[in-house]
Image (spheres, grey):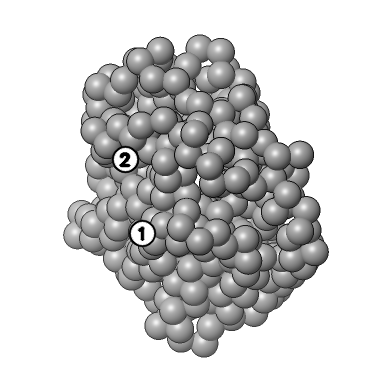
Amino acid sequence: MAAVSSGHGAVDFAGGALPALIPFLKKEFALSYTLVAVLVLASAIAGSIVQPLFGLWSDRRGAIWLLPTGVAIGGIGMALAAASPAYWLAVVFVAVSGLGTAAYHPEGSKFAAYVSGRRRASGMSLFSVGGNIGFGLGAFATGPLVAALGLRSGLLIAVPCLATAAVLLALRSYLLGFVPEREARERTAGEDDLRALGLLLTVITFRSLAWYGLLTFVPLWEVSLGHSAKFGSFLLGLMLLTGGVGTLAAGPIADRVGTRTVLLAANLVISPMMFVFVLVGGVPGALALALVGIAVISTFGITMVMAQQYLPTRIGMASGLSIGFSIGLGGIAAVILGAIADSIDLKTALYVSSVAPVVAVLLTLLLPREGARRLEPEIVVP
């Protein structure tokens, strides 16, 4: 678990660098809000929507080599995006970094499921917290680094990713020891529930619309208020890192009270706290932003478990769908929010994204109640 969680942290470190880079890239290339959102769209399409394809490949053939390869590509792509001499090159390299993310997540989450045993929500939370912390550190480290040394210093983003990729490559044989035999996987899998899976993915999509609105525009919102890009990156990092801490509690709580219950409670928090951030600002706004981070990030692992529960015969595909496809649709919505910010103003775009979690709450109520289905544990091979 330490290995796959660290890999998750490294690949998401590169992903977390993008929101922190956005204010600097906007200034460097004189970008509109719509063109800023295109950077997020490139990351979303490459890093999210194609994840189910990697998940399908993982389920059918196994692909442990995706772990070190995904981390390395993620870091190299984002490093080159930071140092790009032209906007279109930055878009291309952001997409390359996204492909690394897409490659890592389904295989990484599958191995996290293998080693979690019966406490699947707790185990998946440990996997998720690595990514959450990595994403937050990426935002925290990149903003001050680029502010002090310029965009070319973003090449250093690749360093922790390449180091982690080397470790994962060295641990390949050890990790393969946890893969159960095909017959054992089929015996413990259970039946697929495609209706529940479709509902869950729709919930994730609406939640992600709000989330990508924040990832894209929090630093720019702070700049519009007269604060520095560095301060905006700090708030973004605060939201991400507090969410990582919340993940440690959410998994064990979900194992006790149920995944649906925790997801519903978290979704109820998001919309009002986003309005507090925009309308009130200051210290209350920063605290509200931290609570949004906890509500969204702490349930990433939980929705991954729920997807694997609803599609137990193809857990790689389930992970790719929950992490990738639905989150990616939220990223596509960021372009629409960017257009709203250009045509009206940034505050209106943030208001629109704040309403989306209300739909997520209503759809969460339609998910099967705890006890209606039970997630069978994967067999762990010592």
Q: Earlier in the sequence, mark 1 or mark 2?
A: 1
Q: Residue at x 52, y 36 (%)?
A: 301
Q: Residue furthest left?
A: 343
| Residue that numbered label 2 is attached to | 201
Whether residue 148 is situated above or below residue 126 in the rendered picture: below
Viewer-side residue, 316 vs 266: 316
Q: Residue at x 60, y 45 (%)?
A: 181
Q: Position of residue 135 (x, y in %)?
A: 60, 51
| Residue that numbered label 1 is attached to | 49
Viewer-side residue, 190 vs 151: 190
Q: Is residue 265 in sight in this rendering?
A: no
Q: Please rate how many residues cluster around mark 1, counting C-alpha atoms within 10 Å: few if below 14, some from 14 to 19, many from 20.
A: many
Viewer-side residue, 273 vs 27: 273
Whether residue 238 is situated above or below residue 255 in the rendered picture: below
**Relative to 342, 178 lies left or right:** right
Q: Quadrant of residue 192?
A: top left
Q: Quadrant of residue 126?
A: top right
Q: Residue at x 24, y 57 (%)?
A: 336
Q: Position of residue 2 (x, y in %)?
A: 75, 44
Whether residue 14 is situated above or below residue 276 in the rendered picture: below
Q: Residue at x 62, y 75 (%)?
A: 76
Tag 1: residue type?
Ile
Q: Position of residue 87 (x, y in %)?
A: 42, 81
Q: Secondary structure at mark 2?
A: helix
